[in-house]
Structures are given as structure tokens and as C-alpha cells.
Image (tube, rainbow, N blue to C red):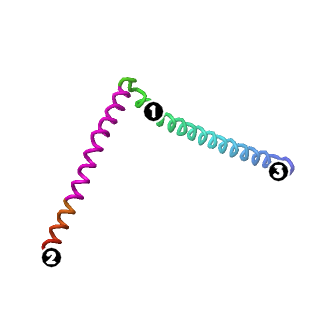
Amino acid sequence: MEISEHILWEQREDRANIFKEITMKRHCMYLVIASVVFCLSFSACSKAKDEESGKGAIDKITDRAAESATKKIKTPIDKARAIQEKEGERTKAMDEAVKE
């Protein structure tokens, strides 16, 4: 009986070892997948920076100059429109006051 018990014990140990190997392989597979996803996420973020830095220095300076020029042009125009709207409101209020 001791021999059969010993054989059963060895079979149980073999099954346990096989189970451990399978779980280790799964964990390694999950680790590899997580590493790949992690690396891909960083490479995706760096592509946007590469495209932006792809502009030359002249293009960057031109873009800044264009932005400042449009701001300088639009600001007085927007102020004039706001004043014109207020003036129109005052005129309407004065016309209504005169009618009453």
C-alpha cells in the first residue's frame, strides 16, 4: 500500500507542478501584454509632439506673428462693435423715452 500511496502522492505533486507552470505562463503572458500596451501608449503620445516639432523655426515665428497681428486687428474692431451696440441701445432707450 505504501507504494500505491507514494505513486498517488507523486501524481498529485506532478499535477500541482503543472498547475503552477500554467499559472506562471499566464502571469508572464499578462505581463507581456501589459508591457506592450504601456509602450504603445507612450509611443502614441510622442507622435503628436513629433508632428508639432516638425515645424521649422521660420514657420513657428510666422505663426506667432500672424496670431499677434490678428489679435491687434480684432481687438479694436471688437471694441468698436461693442460700443456701437451700446450706442444703439441708448438710442432706442431715448426714442422710447421721448415717445412716452
Between discs 2 and 3, the one toward the N terminus: 3
- Left/right of residue 13 with respect to residue 98 in the rendered view: right
Q: Position of residue 34 (x, y in %)?
A: 57, 41
Most extreme residue toward the left is 99
Q: Position of residue 61 (x, y in %)?
A: 37, 27
Between discs 3 and 1, the one toward the N terminus: 3
Residue receiving disc 3: 5
The quarter holding residue 20 reads: top right
Judging from the image, what secondary structure is the residue with disc 2 in? loop
Between circles 2 and 1, the one closer to the viewer is 2
Q: Report the residue at 53% width, 39% height from top.
A: 37
Q: Which residues are magenta?
A: 59-87
Between circles 2 and 3, the one closer to the viewer is 2
Mark identifier at residue 98: none
Say which amino acid is labelled 3. Answer: Glu
Q: Report the residue at 62% width, 43% height from top.
A: 26
Residue receiving disc 1: 49
Say which amino acid is labelled 1. Answer: Lys
Q: Is residue 24 magenta?
A: no
